[in-house]
Structures are given as structure tokens and as C-alpha cells.
Image: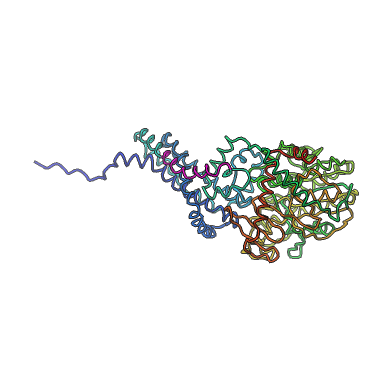
Amino acid sequence: MPSPPSPARSRPAPTPALDRWLVEGGPLAAIMVLLWAKLVYFSALLPSEWWAPEETIMQWMRPALHVVGAILRHPEVLGATLASLLIIAAPLLLLPRFPRLLALLVLDALLTSLGLTDLVHVRYYADVVSLSDVVMAPMVVAVLPRVVESLSTWNALFYLDVLVGLLALSWYQRAGRGMPPHRAFRLKLGVALLGLGLVLAVPTARMAWRHGPGLLGYSSPRIEVAAAIGILPYHLGDLALRLVAERPTIGEPERQRVAGFLAAHSRNTEKRSPLFGKARGKNLIVINAESLQAFPLDMKIDGQPVMPRLSAFARESLHFVNFYDQTHLGTTSDAEFATLQSLHPLAVGVLSNHFRDNQYRGLPRILAEHGYKTVSACAAQADFWNMRVMHAGLGFQRSFFDDSYRMTELIGPWLADHEFFAQTVPILKAQPGPFMAFMLTASNHHPYRLPPQHRELALGAREGTLLGDYLQSVRYFDRAFGVLIDRLRASGLLDTSVVVIYGDHHGFLGDPPELAQLLGFSTADEYQTLHARKRLPLLIRLPKGAHAGVRTAFGGHLDIAPTVLALLGVRDESGVMLGRDLTDGHGSLVVFRDGSFTDGMTWYAHRVGVAAGTCYAVNTRRRVECTGIEERRREALNRLEVSDLVIRGNLISGLMKFWD
């Protein structure tokens, strides 16, 4: 009898348990591990991105070494980030297989994008994004090109796992066909992941409880929190705080602190300048120049002057050569507020979004009380940065927006500057004197895509680069500004007015090596890089160019209003301004929103960490030990906190009664 044939050899079927783990938990585990690694990397990279943004994959290796040190200093970022991911991902196990994998890939893409957005935001604003502000800011669409162009093509590598997952979707669907849904297993796994996430979150929760509301509070940039506990835990905590917390109340102790500080500040700045009242009764024309930095003044490239008209105007003006950018997240709206109200912008959020309905008493309101007609002009939508409400709140009696202009030629989304100036001069001529006019330009805006007919400079290898586009753009602004001055001169307004022009914020150029080469310093020179980025022009021309000359007093946006008031002979007795008159010979302690400051002798650059920071001697431009600066550092932080209290408590009207 023939023996039965031996059965064919085959691989053993996977066990049910292994089957469940591979199909149900495998994709989840892979995506969680990769996403966890990316978010930890982004979190640890924040401090180096703040100081030295990197652009190529080889340059990433240097900050990657920094990442190791950052994780060793803040190991909490590992557990807090993993806890956040587990808590978010656990409910996804309730979904069927295919929708679950798709949801995980979407989550991966969104959180990767959030991390990259934070890096870009830190590069430009020295702070991470506040999701509550992103949701509320309608102007995000207008500035989106800045974010997109700031991303390197290498950033696409961070989405490689998402691409692989999308390509594997159809295979995963076929592989799971016919398998039981394992609902009980998925439920147990989800509960286990949620429990593990909650356990891992305990150390971070304990730290939040110990530090209280200050951990995610309003008074300081939260990059330190994001670097310490991780980008994702920070954003979850920030969003939860904004959703459930009420606006902090300002009590009587805080009011007394503010009143005492302002009284002392008023006493320290009461000395009158020799130029006090030199332009008494004259008109005032203030020009907020979009993205105008100081370095193009008096610059020539291959014999071509970059800004000949503004440079000539500077020689007729009080030319403040040590004037610095004090804006923060709100960019132009911050410059507008700091210039007109002489208070700091917010550390977190944009003031024109959150506090537009406050009672303010800015430069235009003070001048209106002294008989001035006050107008503002900007050929953009009135709701951009909530200008309609903010301008009225600051004291402008009338404002002209895009609906008051013929939109004949656009550069970017706004009216071209030469057309804006041409159509605004008749508005100025129609004002009864004395008047104050505030004009906001728009054409010199990132990414500086100037139409070919307006590109005048021959830049060689710089042509087509961001720096080259910026130089072409400021040259166009210079020509438009020159025509404005010609028309003011022809109308008789130039010599019956004080004309002020200042840069509203830096140009978001990313500190390219070409700029260091152009300005003649090494890319490794930290102070020169920081100085070139922060320095802006401030020019104040008195009628007939009186008292023109270079002024070396250190100042920033907060000092413009007190300086202008002094020149016009107006003394503001309310005292709710933190700047000082830059013509009094003393200069100002220039405080930046991130806690950095300069007093003209030392430049303190704040870094991540409560006591971290780097100091430079201004005269030598070299790094020095941060000794003997504690009193000024406390003064800087005190100013920021007092400014925040005034704004968040809507204290200005009450402080005016206090002074009365």
C-alpha cells in the first residue's frame, strides 16, 4: 500500500496575538515613534534656531549636536512629548483600521507642520506660535508667503514618513481584509496608552502646578517653556489655558505698582532738552516705513547709491544712528502702537487682536488736546491689524483706508507706495493747521517681489536673492519717498512741518552670509549680526532742516512719541509713556520684548533659560562677562511687566485720574 504523500512545507501562520499587534498596533507604534523623535528634535532645536537659523542639511548637523545637550538639560521634553502624543492618539484606536491609519498620517503631517512653523516663528520673532492667536488673526493669509519662503527645501524630508504611509495605505487595506476587527483588543490597548500617557504627564503637571499660571502666562516669551517641556505639550497647555482661563484681573496692588513706577520714570525724564519747543505749533507728518532697516542708507553697490533720497533727507534731519527695533509678534501693528503710545507690545499674542477696545491716550490724542487735527492714512483694508478700531482708540480723528484711494497700481496686495504718496499729499494739503498725519507704507514688504519696471539696481550675483530683492525694493521706496518730499516742498508743507520717518521692523532677511559680506563683517560675528538685524532708521526733519546732524543717543520705537512731543513743545503730564526724549542727551534704556536690552554701553542678549544670556561691550563689539548688569536687567523686566499691566488692566484712563 503506497504511503500517503508528505504534506508540503509552509511557513507557520502568525499567531492571533502577533497578528493583532502587527495589524492593529504596528502602524500606530511606527508613527508615534517617528513623530515623537521629530517633535523632540524641533523642541531641542528652538534655542539654536533663535540665535543662528540654519538652512542646509549639512548645517543642521551643528544644531543637531546642540540637541543632545538641550535634551540633557531638559529631559522632561522626552516624557512630556510622548505623554501628549499617547493621550492624543489613544482615542484613535476606536476607529476602524483604514480611517485610523489615515487619521494618524494627518496627525503626523499637522504636528510636523506645527513644529516647522514654530522654528520659522522663533527665527523671526524669538518666540513660538500661540495657536489662540493664529486662530484669531485674519491677516495670516497676507503674511503666509513669508512663512512659505522661509522654509528650506530640506524641510520636505520631515514629511517622508507621511509620504511612505500614504503609499502604503492600499497595501494595508488589502492586508487587513478578512481579519476580525479586534474591537476588545483595541479598546484595551487604547486604555493602556491613555493610562501610560497620563502617568508620563505627571512630572510636567507637577511642574505646572508648582509654577502656577506664570508657566504659560502673559508676561514673558514662552520659548523657554516650549524648549523645556516640548513644543506639543506647550501648545496643548497654551490652548487649554486660553479656552478655559479668564483674563487676569488687575488689583489695587498692581495699580499702585504701576503708578509708582510711572511716577519714578516721569521724575527721571523730566529734564527738558535744549530743543524743547523748537518746532512749537508746526504740523507733524509721521511715516511708518515698512520693513526699512538702517544699513541701506549711504550704501553704494558698484557705484550705485541704494537710497540717495533718504540719505540726503538724513543730512537735513536729526539722524538717530542708534535706533532699534522694539516690535514683536505684531510687527507693523506693534511698531504703530509702540511709536504712538510708547508702551511695549505683548509678549504673547497681538495687542491689536486682543486689546483693540482698550482706552488709549496716544500721541494723536495728546496733540488733539492741544489743538491739532489728527489723521491717519494707509491704503490697506481698515480691518487689517484692526486698524480702524486701533487708530480711533489712539486718538486719530479721521482715518483714510483703501476705500479712500484709487487702487491704480498694486505691489503685492496693497497700493504701490508712489501712488499712495501721490494720493495722500492732497489729503495733507486739505488739513487745517496745525495737523498731525500718520502714514503707513506697504510696498517694501517681504518677500519683496517688485515688478520689473521698478527694479533699477544692477546687482550681479545678488540679483534674484532675497537680499537682492530687498535692495531693489528699498531703492523703489527711496524713489517714491523722494517724490513725496518734492511735493511737500512744492506745496509749502515741508518747511511748516516736522517730518518723521522710521523703520517699523526688520526685514526678515534671515541674516544671509551675503549681508555680512556686503556690510564687511564675518558671519561668525554674533554682535554685528544681531546689530545689523535690529538697527532701524529714525530721521526727524525740523522746518528748514534746523539742528540737523547725527545723534548717537540709543533709542527705540517707544522713544519716538516723547521726542516728538518735546520738539513740539508739548509736555504730557499723564506720564503713561515708557520712552524718553532722545534729544535730552541721555539716551534710553532700550528694552526688547524678549528681555534683551541695551543701555549704550552693554548689549544683553537674552537666551533660553531664566538666567541665560550673552553680553557684548558696545564700544568694542566683543563678548564680555555679564557682570554688573543685574540692576538694569531687573529694570528691563520691570518695564515689560508694568507695560503689560497697563495694557491688560486697561489702566490708562485710571492712571490719568491718578496724576490729576
Q: How is the image coloured?
A: rainbow
Q: Give the left or right position of residue 590, taking residue 35 as reference.
A: right
| In the rendered image, the vertical position of residue 240 relative to residue 65, given as above or below | above
Q: Determine which quarter of the picture holds residue 234.
A: top right
Residue 230, image x and y in percent? 52, 47
Q: Is residue 182 left or right of residue 42?
A: left
Residue 339 x, y percent position in the rendering: 75, 47
The quadrant the C terminus occupies is top right
| Residue 658 horizontal/vertical position (percent) | 77, 39
Q: Nearer the viewer, residue 402 or 645?
A: 645
Q: Is residue 318 left or right of residue 198?
A: right
In the picture shown, does residue 268 fall above or below 621?
above
When the figure is inspected, residue 605 is found, relative to residue 245, above or below; the finding is: below
Q: Quadrant location of residue 7?
A: top left
**Residue 162 seen in the current view:** no
Residue 419 in view: yes
- Return the residue nearer the eye: 587 or 209: 209
Q: How many marks?
A: 0
Image location (x, y in percent) of residue 57: 53, 57
Q: Main secondary structure of the magenta part?
A: helix
Residue range (magenta): 193-213
State the quadrant of the N terminus.
top left
Q: Within the magenta stretch, is there residue 195? A: yes
Q: Nearer the viewer, residue 527 or 467?
A: 527
Task: Say if the magenta span includes residue 227.
Answer: no
